Image (tube, rainbow, N blue to C red):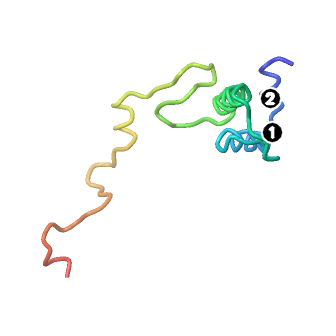
């Protein structure tokens, strides 16, 4: 089986189980992952995420397997609010808060 075929055969449920195994270091039956299994599972999870779980994260692996980064300007522009719109407003005068 080719790697692309393996990725295509993974169901969302299987993907979640793989992610869980990497996070806790054990398979669902409680058996610990070996170092080799951990490495292979992380690689598989990253490849699946890159191909089937598009993300706007600033640093991620793209569908082509290359690292995708956003510039500071792109991140700042994405976080900017329209002019005149406030996210929050606080009074600096303690008497106003009573």
Q: Is residue 45 above or below residue 5?
A: below
Label 1 CA crowd tier, 10 Å (few <14, some 14–19, many 20+): few
Label 1: which residue? Answer: 11
**Residue 56 circle label:** none
Q: For residue 91, what is the image quadrant?
A: bottom left
Task: List x then y, in percent, for residue 83.
Answer: 27, 49
Task: List x then y, in percent, for residue 80.
Answer: 34, 44
Tag 1 secondary structure? loop
Front residue of 21 and 95: 21
Q: Quadrant of the N terminus?
A: top right
Q: Is residue 89 above or below residue 8?
A: below
- Going by the picture, which residue comes out furthest to the right? 1
Judge left or right: residue 68 versus residue 73. right
- Going by the picture, which residue comes out furthest to the bottom? 98
The residue positioned 73% from the left and 31% from the top of the image is: 34
Front residue of 89 and 42: 42
Label 2: which residue? Answer: 8
Tag 2 secondary structure? helix
The residue positioned 50% from the left and 36% from the top of the image is: 57
Label 2 CA crowd tier, 10 Å (few <14, some 14–19, many 20+): few
**Distance of mark 1 from mark 2, alpha carbons?**
8 Å
Q: For residue 49, what is the image quadrant?
A: top right
The residue positioned 15% from the left and 66% from the top of the image is: 92
Label 1 with label 2: CB-CB less than 8 Å? no
Q: Is residue 32 above or below residue 61?
A: below
Q: Is residue 11 above or below residue 36?
A: below
Q: Quadrant of the C terminus?
A: bottom left
Front residue of 71 and 81: 71
The residue positioned 62% from the left and 19% from the top of the image is: 64
Task: List x then y, in percent, for residue 9.
Answer: 84, 31
Task: List x then y, in percent, for residue 65.
Answer: 61, 20
């Amino acid at each position: 089986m080719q790697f692309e075929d393996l990725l295509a055969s993974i169901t969302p449920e299987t993907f979640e189980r793989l992610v869980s195994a990497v996070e806790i270091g054990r398979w669902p039956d409680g058996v610990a992952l070996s170092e080799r299994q951990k490495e292979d599972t992380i690689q598989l999870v990253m490849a699946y995420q890159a191909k089937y779980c598009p993300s706007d994260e600033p640093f991620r692996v793209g569908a082509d397997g290359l690292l995708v980064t956003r510039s500071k300007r792109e991140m700042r522009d994405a976080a900017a609010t329209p002019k005149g719109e406030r996210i929050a407003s606080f009074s600096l005068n303690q008497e106003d808060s009573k």
